[in-house]
Amino acid sequence: MTRGGQGLARVAVVVRAGAAPLWWLGVLAAGIGLLAPGLTGRRIGVLAGAALFVLATAVVACARRKRYAALAAAASRAGKHDVLQDRAVTVRNWRRGQRWWLLLAFLAALGSAFAVPAAGGMLLAGCGAGLWLKSAWLGRREQAGEALLWVRVDWLRGGAARPTGNRVKAYRSTGIAAGDASPGGARRKSPTLV
């Protein structure tokens, strides 16, 4: 990093980083949970799990949207000395920092199967689906504003991997072609010349 520059991570990539692990751990926990009859029985467990899946998806997808919108509206332009972090590095850092929480969530979902089969896993999968929907919403905002949103990397350290956390004071913005991720945080389908 050169003088006066900041390391910046894409907001949508940080949001999207937890989607795949939560989804797949949830699907795995739900599948394993179906093997146990549980206290309520499989049918009630699956119905409760479906309700929890829908609820978790909606809550996670809609949570803190006003804060995202406020930070996006006040975003300042990134400087020429700012360093844009690669998508793969952002995803790896988020997952490495949250691995113990992901493991605990998976074990809790498995343990809940002895009471309500599959419900805990479906709740976890719903959280992952909600993060995908939220990153898609951010991608639509970025497309409409023709500006990608970035957050300082140092504000995401120390277990505070939320791009709307208390440590986050402002976002930075760049043109739509900056970085190696498309709006919404997915990999770019083809390299873009900047």
Image: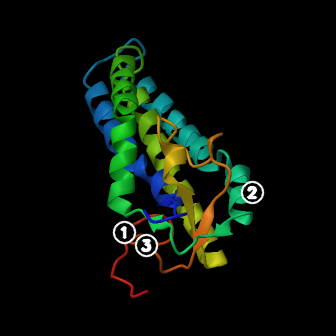
Q: Which amino acid type is shown beneath numbered disc 3? A: Gly
Q: CA distance from mark 1 to mark 3?
A: 10 Å
In the rendered image of this protein, does residue 126 appear above or below residue 186? above
Label 2 residue SS: helix
In the rendered image of this protein, does residue 8 appear above or below residue 181? above
Tag 2–tag 3 contact (CB < 8 Å):
no
| Relative image position of residue 77 (x, y in whole percent) | 64, 72
Numbered label attached to residue 70 = 2
Quadrant position of the N terminus in the picture: bottom left
User: Which residue appears at 26% of the width and 28% of the height?
Assistant: 32
Binning the other alpha carbons within 10 Å of mark 1 as few (below 14), some (14 to 19) or many (20 upward) gives some
| Relative image position of residue 149 (x, y in whole percent) | 58, 65
Query: Does residue 23 appear anywhere in the picture?
Result: no
Numbered label attached to residue 187 = 1
User: Which residue appears at 39% of the width and 88% of the height?
Assistant: 193
In front of the other: label 2 or label 3? 3
Query: Does residue 164 appear anywhere in the picture?
Result: yes
Residue, far top: 39
In this view, the residue in front, 85 or 99, is 85
| Relative image position of residue 6 (x, y in whole percent) | 51, 60
Pick whichever of labels 1 and 3 is earlier in the sequence.
3
